[in-house]
């Protein structure tokens, strides 16, 4: 059993008492524990079930590499799946539940899968569930969905109560990893005066060194770490962050750091996570190394752990993973675990060393402590079900014939170490295979390069393949100095600290144990614990022709999911290489992609949630609309009133009322969102002639003209009224959503094509609040406000004038998008609300009716006016819309002219704009297609047109629509069939003129 | 995420402050041009593995369009220059030649 | 005529820094040849301030000149004087290719005060706000989260942030979130 020892545990406070629960059962731990150490202290060895076979899983590691101990944390709105128990700091009230089991962790029905383990081989899903086809949807998929999946997604109805934020930091050097290598690299860099940021993913500085021992400058690693952290903390140019993981390295020195501020103490206020968005001149990755498992049968049974993890739990938390722990290894480092256990009074029945000659001084030290060491031996298989009961020992050389059996309840395994090269590799750093030590390490000749073409990542410590303290510190010192030099600083000549640790004998690469393990053993030798991939699966994939490591990953699922193969990757690709008869470097690794471990969606979103999820643009009259019950419609980022339903009204009734009130008397629209762009200069007219399809240079000051804008490929992109202010100045109105886009379009042409033209633009959209006063009483209202002459003669249709109304400085445009007598009045935005209030008050006698975008749409449709985004969709040219009158024949050139001459654009068979009236008076469905006889090659019904706008017209009392129809204008009066959403029901509509109301314009020209 | 130094205001701009505008140094073909020229102007683009010339706008900044030469493989930036030119300046070409001997892009080399 | 109304009516928040909606501020957009002597004279005479260099912010009280781009200045004047200042500048630049517009109503301004200023700003913009990179008197146009914005430091603990008027509410809420008193960072030494 695993248990807390009476002494030891450098990170825990034994005087503290922390209560937590696992699967509803309550447990106790200490401050400083991780969830994993606390569970082990309580003999909770079984912590989860595997993905495919639901095999029992125990804690195998002690850090970010943990593949098994994934739990659901929290409840309801704080519920979060797939959290690693090994990196979860314990706090009072922590609630965790295990994953992937049903009905309970101890008895799991899915574990039956394991009984058929023989058949669930690599690619099983692909091979098995393909036929018969209907079975997939109704049988296989539901079953797989029920039994697969990691964790449980949070309830979609809950809302994360926590806050998150981003932080942009610019530094000379970032050091990722706060072990002794990272600290020394940081110190060497900081000594040059460089601005240094150090990120450590755990809550503690120093990494593995305090556990592994040795000496630095004659001190214990712990003392040296304390001294160095204090020194760094006192330097103004250094920022130290714990619980902050270097998540990803990207182009041009960009780096993401994931800081977990309150996960360890949820009662704390403030953001839960902070995403550091760093630009660094240089990045040092001192990310350490991860121990590899050994592949022997039963290596996934709870109680089999990495030797380093067994040591961590012992030294850091005073927890023994078992009462009797067998150590199995191919290298010297695991002897440290055996020695530490023995010294702590835990039984170590044997060390099984795959090397014929065994190891060096550490082996001798173990022997001297009375530990039995068996060299040239292997584990044939581990015995046990939900926990280890013993191991069968065999010769390393054979196929697995048992020589002896050792009773034990834990196995500490070590297959050697793999440098954590992830962050080096994220942005293109290449690796080299170290034959002697059997691992990939960064190739300093092929480092990631930055915007200047120079390397910007260096590696320090065991991440660089340095395994001896002496080399670690020397290398880290050099990395710190070199990085600060590359960042433009002058390194100081301080000597690096001296590291001392035991010399180690070479390891023996072991990818399978024993060497020629029989079939049945290989089928129980697990490579990937999380995804249930065995040695036999990778071998099968190789036999079936999978040569690429990337394909093998997808086929076998090796190295997928939350841990991304931190433990399994090297063993897996070594197995693949052996099966293919190739060298490991030829097979290579899969791609390392950020983030290093999963980061929260909240951290990615940062502040962008709730009210500031996205910017909402508000006009100066926004609050008035809100107070008067506006139903909102998003237009770009703007919010515009769709209509203003009154008590007892639905939206449809409100729109109906607004249209009739406007047509009968007086309506009021907030038109502030319309784009307003000043175009000024001696070449302004010439410029606008190029931008608009019609002629703008001939417009007289004081007058307005409606214009169309196309992109260079001929398609209609925007429209609006242009007012000529003076000889050199125009004001161009754009659509509500189009102001920024059209302003950018203008600047692009001016800056990049016609840079010798004398034209300046300014987007003054938000300088003005704009009100449309619309209806037969519009002039009466303006005259009542008083201050300027708005008579028919002084201010005729399509004219504008500056003046004052009710004492407000205004510019009045007499333009109409409704067919009514209409004035658009611009006032400075800071006065907009006051002016609006004044207009509403003055308009009472005419029942002034504020109307929204829908009434605006209905009224323009009644008049046959097009709307950008309804009648246009990026494939429509002005000629399709019968707007030939707005296309200048005199101009040699305008943007889009050449494209409109292309054969497809000039094709007489294009769909053209017409009006549509249903025979029964109903409203056509929006976007409906008109069916034509016959079917196309895909068996779909042929079409001859589609609806672009469709409304119930309150004015005419029937459904009206506009649409694009094949040869439409030549087919007036013809009835064509439109098909409803169901694809069957037909609505007949007659092709008519798109101008449904007041075709002579008598109402607007009064 | 890339950075470019804006040649107008000198800011070392973050990619999120910029708007990408595609290939640089296109020649506009308007009315009267052949179908082939117009097609090339509107649609045909380089897709090099290596040296490339692009347009960028410092949109969340001084608002100016500039050109940049960079390597699409390594993302090395050879330099940025104002957009009011029909061809890259010599100093940019020299930098590229020193760093990527034998490079070609359209008719440039 | 009524008094001008600020987009948020003068909103305030106290947190890691004090956030206060400022203004109204008179603003004249001036586009032209910034090297031209007549233009320079018109601007310096109007404001009583020297011409700013590239990215410069020459500001004194309600008057100022901000370098917006190689051919654009934002001239700050007291709000009530903006129409007259516009006319004065336009008059001075008569016959010259230039654009002069009164844009006093199209932006929202916020004043941030406090020792944690640089940390708060660094939460929202991809900009180096370290003292050496962002000294007082330098204007940086950038984005704050999802909207375009400009910022300059009046002194080491005071910044002026502006954005378009329509997103004033968004900007204010952003600044409040960033200034959450429980969200201390401690990166830029206060």
Image (cartoon, coloured by chain):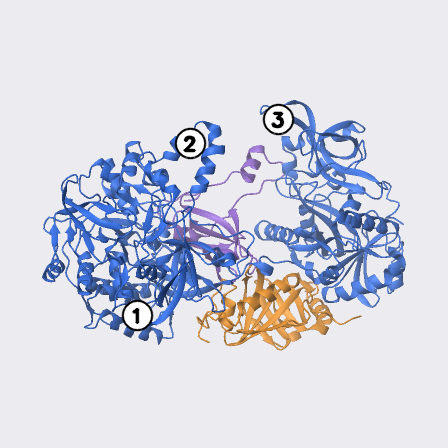
Please name the residue that numbered disc 1 is placed on: A187
Q: Secondary structure at mark 3?
A: loop
Residue A419 rendering spot, x and y as whole percentages: 27, 54
Chain letter of disc 1? A
Please name the residue that numbered disc 3 is placed on: A940
* Crowdedness near tag 1: few (<14), some (14–19) or many (≥20) residues, C-alpha within 10 Å: many
Residue B33 rendering spot, x and y as whole percentages: 60, 36
Q: Who's orange, chain-wise?
A: C
Question: Pointers 3 and 1 in contact (CB under 8 A)?
Answer: no
Q: Who's blue, chain-wise?
A: A
Chain B tint in image: purple
- Image-quadrant location for residue A146: top left
Chain letter of disc 3? A
Please name the residue that numbered disc 2 is placed on: A129
Specify the quadrant that holds the C terminus of chain B: top left
* Crowdedness near tag 3: few (<14), some (14–19) or many (≥20) residues, C-alpha within 10 Å: few
């Amino acid at each position: 059993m695993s248990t807390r020892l009476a002494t030891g545990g450098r990170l825990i406070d034994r005087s503290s008492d922390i209560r937590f629960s696992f699967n509803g059962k309550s447990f106790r731990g200490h401050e400083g524990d991780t969830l994993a150490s606390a569970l082990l202290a309580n003999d909770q060895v079984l912590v989860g079930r595997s993905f495919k076979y639901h095999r029992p899983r125990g804690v195998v590691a002690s850090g970010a590499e943990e593949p098994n101990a994934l739990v659901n944390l929290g409840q309801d709105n704080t519920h979060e799946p797939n959290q690693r128990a090994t990196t979860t700091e314990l706090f009072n009230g922590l609630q965790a539940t295990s994953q992937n089991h049903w009905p309970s962790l101890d008895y799991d029905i899915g574990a039956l899968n394991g009984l058929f383990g023989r058949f669930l081989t690599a690619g099983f899903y692909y091979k098995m569930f393909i036929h018969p086809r209907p079975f997939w949807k109704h049988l296989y998929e539901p079953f797989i969905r029920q039994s697969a999946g990691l964790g449980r997604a949070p309830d979609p109805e809950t809302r994360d109560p926590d806050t998150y934020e981003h932080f942009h930091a610019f530094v000379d050097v970032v050091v990722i990893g706060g072990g002794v290598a990272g600290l020394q690299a940081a110190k060497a860099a900081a000594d040059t005066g460089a601005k240094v940021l150090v990120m450590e993913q755990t809550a503690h500085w120093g990494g593995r060194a305090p556990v592994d021992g040795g000496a630095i400058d004659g001190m214990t690693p712990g003392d040296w770490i304390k001294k160095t952290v204090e020194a760094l903390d006192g330097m103004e140019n250094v920022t130290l962050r714990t619980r902050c993981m270097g998540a990803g390295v990207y182009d041009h020195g960009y780096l993401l750091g994931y800081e977990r501020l309150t996960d360890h103490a949820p009662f704390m206020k403030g953001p839960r996570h902070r995403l550091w968005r760093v630009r660094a001149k240089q990045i040092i990755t001192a990310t350490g190394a991860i121990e590899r498992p050994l592949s022997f049968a039963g290596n996934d049974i709870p109680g089999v752990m990495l030797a380093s993890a067994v040591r961590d739990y012992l030294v850091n938390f005073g927890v023994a993973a078992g009462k009797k722990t067998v150590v199995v290894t191919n290298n010297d480092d695991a002897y440290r675990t055996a020695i530490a256990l023995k010294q702590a009074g835990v039984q170590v029945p044997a060390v099984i060393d795959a090397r014929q000659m065994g190891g060096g001084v550490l082996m001798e030290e173990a022997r001297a402590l009375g530990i039995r060491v068996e060299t040239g031996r292997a584990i044939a298989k581990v015995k046990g079900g939900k926990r280890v009961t013993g191991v069968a020992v065999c010769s390393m050389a054979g196929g697995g014939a048992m020589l002896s059996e050792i009773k034990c309840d834990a196995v500490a395994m070590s297959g050697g170490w793999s440098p954590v090269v992830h962050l080096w590799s994220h942005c293109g750093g290449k690796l080299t295979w170290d034959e002697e030590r059997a691992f990939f390490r960064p190739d300093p000749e092929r480092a990631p390069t930055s915007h200047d073409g120079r390397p910007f990542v260096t590696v320090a410590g065991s991440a660089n393949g340095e395994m001896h303290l002496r080399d670690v510190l020397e290398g880290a010192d050099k990395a710190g100095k070199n990085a600060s030099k590359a960042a433009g600083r002058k390194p100081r000549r301080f000597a690096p600290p001296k590291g001392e640790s035991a010399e180690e004998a070479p390891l023996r690469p072991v990818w399978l144990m024993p060497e020629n393990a029989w079939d049945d053993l290989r089928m129980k030798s697990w490579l990937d614990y999380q995804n249930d991939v065995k040695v036999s699966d990778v071998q099968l994939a190789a036999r079936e022709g999978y040569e690429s490591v990337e394909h093998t990953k997808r086929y076998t699922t090796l190295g997928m999911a939350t841990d991304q193969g931190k433990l399994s990757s090297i063993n897996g690709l070594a197995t693949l290489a052996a099966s293919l008869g190739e060298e490991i470097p030829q097979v290579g690794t899969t791609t390392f992609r950020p983030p290093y471990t999963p980061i929260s969606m909240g951290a990615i979103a940062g502040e962008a949630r709730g009210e500031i999820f996205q910017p909402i643009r508000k006009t100066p009259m926004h609050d008035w609309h809100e107070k008067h019950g506006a139903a909102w419609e998003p237009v770009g980022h703007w919010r515009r009133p769709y209509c203003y339903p009154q008590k007892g009204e639905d939206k449809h009734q409100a729109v109906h009322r607004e249209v009739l009130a406007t047509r009968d008397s007086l309506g009021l629209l907030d038109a502030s969102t319309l784009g307003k762009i000043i175009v000024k200069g001696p070449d302004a007219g010439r410029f606008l002639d190029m931008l608009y399809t019609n002629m703008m240079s001939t417009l007289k000051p004081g007058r307005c003209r409606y214009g169309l804008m196309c992109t260079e490929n001929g398609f209609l992109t925007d429209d609006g009224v242009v007012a000529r202010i003076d000889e050199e100045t125009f004001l161009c109105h754009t659509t509500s959503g189009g102001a920024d886009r059209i302003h950018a379009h203008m600047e692009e042409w001016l800056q990049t094509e016609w840079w010798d033209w004398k034209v300046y633009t300014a987007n003054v959209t938000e300088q003005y609040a704009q009100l449309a006063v619309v209806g037969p009483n519009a002039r009466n209202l303006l005259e009542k406000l008083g201050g300027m002459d708005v008579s028919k003669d002084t201010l005729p249709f399509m004219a504008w004038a500056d003046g004052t109304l009710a004492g407000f400085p205004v510019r009045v445009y007499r333009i109409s998008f409704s067919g009514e007598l209409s004035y658009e009045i611009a006032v400075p935005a800071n006065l907009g609300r006051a002016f609006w209030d004044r207009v509403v008050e003055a308009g009472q006698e005419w029942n002034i009716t504020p109307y929204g975008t829908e009434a605006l749409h209905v009224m323009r449709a009644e008049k046959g006016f097009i709307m950008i985004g309804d009648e246009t969709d990026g494939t429509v040219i002005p000629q399709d819309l019968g707007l030939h009158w707005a296309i200048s024949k005199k101009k040699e050139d305008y943007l889009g002219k050449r494209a409109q001459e292309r054969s497809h654009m000039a094709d007489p068979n294009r769909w053209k704009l017409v009006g549509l009236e249903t025979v029964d008076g109903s409203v056509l469905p929006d976007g409906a297609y008109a069916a034509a006889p016959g079917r196309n090659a895909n068996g779909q019904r042929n079409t001859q047109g589609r609806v672009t706008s469709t409304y119930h017209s309150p004015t005419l009392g029937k459904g009206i629509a506009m649409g694009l129809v094949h040869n439409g204008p030549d087919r007036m009066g013809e009835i064509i069939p439109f098909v409803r959403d169901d694809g069957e029901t037909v609505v007949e509509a007659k092709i008519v003129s798109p101008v449904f109301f007041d075709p002579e314009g008598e109402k607007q020209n009064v | 995420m890339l950075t470019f130094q804006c040649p107008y205001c000198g800011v070392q701009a973050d990619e999120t402050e910029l708007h990408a505008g595609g290939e640089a140094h296109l020649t506009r073909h308007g009315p009267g041009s052949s179908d082939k020229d117009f097609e090339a102007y509107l649609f045909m683009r380089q897709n090099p593995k290596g040296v490339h010339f692009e347009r960028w706008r410092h949109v969340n900044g001084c608002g100016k369009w500039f050109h940049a030469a960079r390597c699409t493989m390594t993302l090395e930036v050879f330099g940025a220059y104002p957009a009011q030119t029909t061809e890259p300046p010599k100093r940019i070409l020299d930098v590229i030649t020193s760093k990527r001997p034998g490079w070609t892009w359209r008719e440039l080399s | 005529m009524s008094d001008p109304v600020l987009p948020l009516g003068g909103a305030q928040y106290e947190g890691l820094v004090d956030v206060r909606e400022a203004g109204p501020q008179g603003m004249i957009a001036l586009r032209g040849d910034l090297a031209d002597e007549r233009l320079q004279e018109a601007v310096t005479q109007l404001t009583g301030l020297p011409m700013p260099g590239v990215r410069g912010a020459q500001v004194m009280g309600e008057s100022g000149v901000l370098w917006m781009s190689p051919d654009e200045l934002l001239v700050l004047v007291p709000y009530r004087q903006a129409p007259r200042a516009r006319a004065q500048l336009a008059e001075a630049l008569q016959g010259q290719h230039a654009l002069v517009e009164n844009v006093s109503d199209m932006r929202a301004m916020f004043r941030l005060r406090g020792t944690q200023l640089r940390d708060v700003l660094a939460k929202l913009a991809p900009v180096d706000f370290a003292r050496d990179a962002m000294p007082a008197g330098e204007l940086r146009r950038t984005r704050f989260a999802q909207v375009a914005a400009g910022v300059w430091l009046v002194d080491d603990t005071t910044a002026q942030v502006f954005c378009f008027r329509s997103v004033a509410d968004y900007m204010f809420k952003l600044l409040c979130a960033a200034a959450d008193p429980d969200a201390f960072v401690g990166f830029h030494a206060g």
